[in-house]
Image (cartoon, helix red, strand yellow):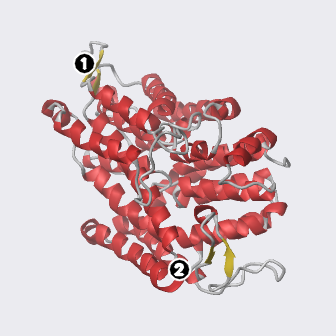
C-alpha cells in the first residue's frame, strides 16, 4: 500500500487552513478559481471550479462541535445544535452560490439528502409501530443471537430498519444489566457491518447499484469477508458480555420463553418502502423523472409512509416503544449540516484521487474510503472513490456499461471500497445515519452513552481497527 498517497487523501478531509501545500510540485492541489473537469456529482454538467481549501473549515468545525458539544457544553449544544448545523451549512451554500456559481453541486447534494432522510424517516416510523417482546432471561448467548439476527436482516430491511426494529427489545431484554458496550456492539454489527451483502443493506451499496453494479454482486463478492468479520466481532462481544454479572439479581424472575410481535401490519409499510427503493429512472426506465425537482416518486412514497404509518399506528405500541420523533429530528438537523459542509471536502478528495489514481492500489482505496467514511457520510464518499477507481482504468462512473464492466474486470477494487464504506461507517456516530438514531434512543432510555471521543478511543479504535487491519492483510495487502 502506498502510505503517502493514503495520507494525502485522508488529510484532505480535515484541512483547517487555506493554501496549505500538501502535495509535491508535480501534483499540486488546484487552487480555487482553477477550472477542472466535473467530479462525480457534476459529471455531465460542464466544468466547475474547485473550492478553496479553507471551505473545509465549516465541516471541520461542525465535526468538532458534534464531538465536544455533548461533553463540554451539553445544555448549549442541546438547545442550539439545529441552528449551528444550519448556519454552518448555509456558509457553504452561500459560497457555492455567490462565489463559485455552482448550483448543480448544491442541487445534487439536496437530492441526496432528501433521499437519505426519506429512507431513514420512513423506516424509523414504520418500525416504530412494531413491538417485539422477548420474554427470556438475558444471557451472552441470547444477546449474541439477537445481534447475529440483526446483522442478517439488515440486508433485507436495511441497517436503519433492522436497528429501529431491534434496538428497543434489545434494551428491554437486558434490563438491569444494560451497559454502553451493548449498544456499541449493536451499532457495530446491526447498524453497519451487517448490511454489507445487498444494495438494500446500506446506502453506499444502493448508490452503486443505481450506477450499474449487479444487485447480487455484493453478496457473491463480499460474503466471505462479511462472515468471518461478523463472527469475530460477535465472539469479542460474547467474551465481554460473559463478564457482565449485573443481571444476576434477576434470577427469581419467571420467564415464559416467548417471543411476541404486534403491529405486524406495519410490515406492509416496510415492504412498500423496500419496493419504492427501486422506483428510480436509473433502475426502471418507465419510472418518470421529476427533474429538475430534487426528489422523485421514491421520496414521495417514503414521506407518505412516514405520515400514514404514524397516523395508523397503535398508540399502545408507540407508548410501549417510547416512540417519539426526537431521534430522527436530531439526525435530520445534523446531517443537513453535514451534507452541505462536506461538499468542498468531497470535491477536493475526488479531484486528488483521480490525479493519483494510477498510483493507488486496492489496499490504499480500502483505507482511504474507510477512514473518510467514518467521518464523512459513507454514501457520497463511496461514490467519489468509485469514480476515482473507474478513472484509474479509463471508465466513467456515470456510464452504466463502464460500471458493469468494471465489476467484472476489477472486482478487487470494487470490493475494497464496498467493504470499507460499510464497515468503517461504524467508526463514529456520524459514519452512518442509524448510529445517531440508536444513540439518541438509548440516551432517552436512560443509558449513558460515551461521547464522540469516548466512542472512538474506547471502542472503535481498539476493537474495530485491529479487525479491519486483519481484513486488509488477508484480502488487500500487496494486491492490485
Q: Residues within 10 Å of mark 2 (few under 14, many from 20)?
A: many
Mark carried by residue 316: none
User: 388 and 233: which one is in front?
Assistant: 388
Residue contact at pointers 2 and 1, CB within 8 angstroms: no
Image side of residue 131 versus residue 62, left or right:
left
Q: Nearer the viewer, residue 169 or 155?
A: 155
- The residue depicted at 55 percent of the width and 45 percent of the height is 282
- How many C-alpha atoms fall within 10 Å of the one at disc 1: few (<14), some, or many (≥20)? few
Please give left or right for residue 239 compared with residue 474 in the image: left
Q: Is residue 208 shown to the viewer in this render?
A: yes
Point 50% across, 54% down: residue? 431
**Rendered image quadrant of residue 182:** top left
Q: Is residue 463 visible?
A: no
- State the residue lying farthest toward the left: 315
Residue 337 at x, y = what percent? 40, 67
Left or right of 105 in this view: 73: left
> Quick one: SS at disc 1?
loop
Q: Position of residue 62 (x, y in %)?
A: 43, 71
Could you tell me which quadrant the N terminus lies in? bottom right
Is the residue 196 above or below the residue 424 in the image?
above
As rendered, which of 318 and 429 lies closer to the eye? 318
Front position in the image: 71 or 229: 229
Label 2 to label 1, Cα distance in Å? 60 Å
Q: Which residue is mark 2?
A: 55
Residue with the mark numbered 1 = 252
Task: Give the image quarter of residue 470.
Answer: top right
Mark 2 lies on a secondary structure that is helix
Residue 260 in percent (x, y) is at 28, 18
Q: Residue at x 37, y 47 (%)?
A: 299
Sequence order check, earlier mark of 2 and 1: 2
Amino acid at each position: 500500500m502506498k502510505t503517502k498517497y493514503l495520507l494525502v487523501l485522508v488529510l484532505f478531509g480535515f484541512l483547517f487552513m487555506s493554501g496549505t501545500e500538501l502535495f509535491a510540485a508535480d501534483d499540486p492541489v488546484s487552487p480555487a478559481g482553477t477550472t477542472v473537469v466535473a467530479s462525480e456529482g457534476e459529471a455531465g454538467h460542464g466544468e466547475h471550479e474547485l473550492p478553496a481549501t479553507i471551505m473545509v473549515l465549516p465541516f471541520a468545525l461542525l465535526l468538532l462541535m458534534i464531538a465536544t458539544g455533548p461533553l463540554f457544553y451539553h445544555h448549549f449544544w442541546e438547545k442550539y445544535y439545529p441552528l449551528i448545523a444550519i448556519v454552518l451549512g448555509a456558509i457553504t451554500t452561500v459560497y457555492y452560490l455567490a462565489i463559485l456559481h455552482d448550483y448543480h453541486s448544491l442541487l445534487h447534494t439536496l437530492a441526496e439528502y432528501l433521499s437519505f432522510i426519506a429512507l431513514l424517516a420512513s423506516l424509523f416510523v414504520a418500525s416504530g409501530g412494531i413491538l417485539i417482546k422477548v420474554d427470556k432471561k438475558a444471557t451472552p448467548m441470547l444477546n449474541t443471537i439477537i445481534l447475529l439476527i440483526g446483522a442478517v436482516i439488515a440486508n433485507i430491511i436495511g441497517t436503519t430498519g433492522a436497528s429501529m426494529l431491534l434496538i428497543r427489545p434489545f434494551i428491554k431484554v437486558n434490563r438491569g444489566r444494560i451497559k454502553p458496550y451493548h449498544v456499541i456492539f449493536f451499532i457495530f454489527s446491526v447498524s453497519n457491518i451487517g448490511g454489507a451483502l445487498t444494495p438494500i443493506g446500506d446506502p453506499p451499496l444502493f448508490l452503486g447499484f443505481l450506477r450499474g453494479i449487479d444487485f447480487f454482486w455484493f453478496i457473491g463478492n463480499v460474503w466471505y469477508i462479511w462472515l468471518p468479520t461478523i463472527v469475530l466481532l460477535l465472539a469479542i462481544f460474547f467474551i465481554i458480555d460473559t463478564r457482565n454479572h449485573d443481571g444476576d439479581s434477576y434470577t427469581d424472575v419467571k420467564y415464559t420463553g416467548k417471543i411476541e410481535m404486534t403491529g405486524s401490519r406495519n410490515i406492509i409499510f416496510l415492504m412498500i418502502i423496500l419496493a419504492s427503493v427501486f422506483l428510480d429512472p436509473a433502475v426502471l426506465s418507465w419510472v418518470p423523472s421529476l427533474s429538475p425537482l430534487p426528489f422523485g416518486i421514491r421520496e414521495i412514497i417514503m414521506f407518505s409512509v412516514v405520515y400514514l404509518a404514524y397516523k395508523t399506528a397503535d398508540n399502545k405500541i408507540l407508548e410501549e416503544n417510547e416512540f417519539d420523533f426526537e431521534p430522527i429530528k436530531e439526525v435530520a438537523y445534523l446531517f443537513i449540516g453535514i451534507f452541505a459542509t462536506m461538499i468542498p471536502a468531497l470535491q477536493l478528495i475526488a479531484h486528488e484521487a483521480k490525479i493519483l489514481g494510477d498510483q493507488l492500489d486496492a489496499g490504499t482505496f480500502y483505507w482511504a474510503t474507510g477512514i473518510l467514511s467514518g467521518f464523512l457520510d459513507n454514501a457520497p464518499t463511496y461514490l467519489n472513490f468509485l469514480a476515482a477507481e473507474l478513472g484509474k482504468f479509463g471508465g466513467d462512473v456515470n456510464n452504466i456499461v463502464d460500471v458493469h464492466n468494471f465489476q467484472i474486470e476489477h472486482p478487487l477494487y470494487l470490493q475494497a471500497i464496498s467493504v470499507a464504506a460499510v464497515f468503517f461507517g461504524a467508526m463514529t456516530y456520524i459514519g452512518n445515519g442509524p448510529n445517531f438514531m440508536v444513540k439518541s434512543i438509548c440516551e432517552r432510555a436512560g443509558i449513558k452513552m460515551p461521547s464522540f471521543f469516548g466512542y472512538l478511543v474506547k471502542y472503535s479504535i481498539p476493537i474495530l481497527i485491529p479487525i479491519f487491519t486483519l481484513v486488509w492483510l488477508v484480502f488487500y495487502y500487496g494486491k492490485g
